[in-house]
Image (cartoon, rainbow, N blue to C red):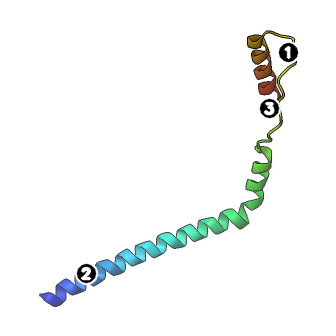
Amino acid sequence: MKGNVKKSIVTRIRLAFLGVSLFSCAIVWKVTQIQFAQGEQWRALEQERRVVYQPCLPPAATYSPPMAAALWLLRCLSTG
């Protein structure tokens, strides 16, 4: 009876270890695929979608403050 329970516990631990090992191998495989096989594709996509921060200075003080703020916002949004 006791030997059977011990064998059952050891079997469960081995199955859990096997599952975790397979999962970690799958993660390593996917990381390797992304890094080396698909790397150029992802780097090109990153270059295409890169956000470039450009200074957007407010307009001169020839407009009323609400109008100047609206024009500044429109200009900043249209340059991006």
| Closer to the eye: label 2 or 3 | 3
Choose top left, top right, bottom left or bottom right for residue 34.
bottom right
Above or below, comparing residue 26 to residue 64 in the picture:
below
Residue at screen point 76% across, 43% down: 49
Secondary structure beneath label 3: loop
Identify residue for label 3: 80
Label 2 – label 3 distance at C-alpha: 61 Å
Choose top left, top right, bottom left or bottom right for residue 66.
top right
| Closer to the eye: label 1 or 2 | 1
Amino acid of disc 3: Gly
Give coordinates of residue 56: x percent, y percent. Answer: 82, 30
Secondary structure beneath label 1: loop
Q: Earlier in the sequence, mark 1 or mark 2?
A: 2
Residue at screen point 83% across, 37% down: 54
Residue at screen point 72% across, 60% down: 38
Identify residue for label 1: 61
Q: Foreground: 15 or 64? A: 64
Q: Are marks 1 and 2 in contact (CB under 8 Å)?
A: no
Identify residue for label 2: 9
Q: Quadrant of the C terminus?
A: top right
Q: Earlier in the sequence, mark 1 or mark 3?
A: 1
Secondary structure beneath label 2: helix
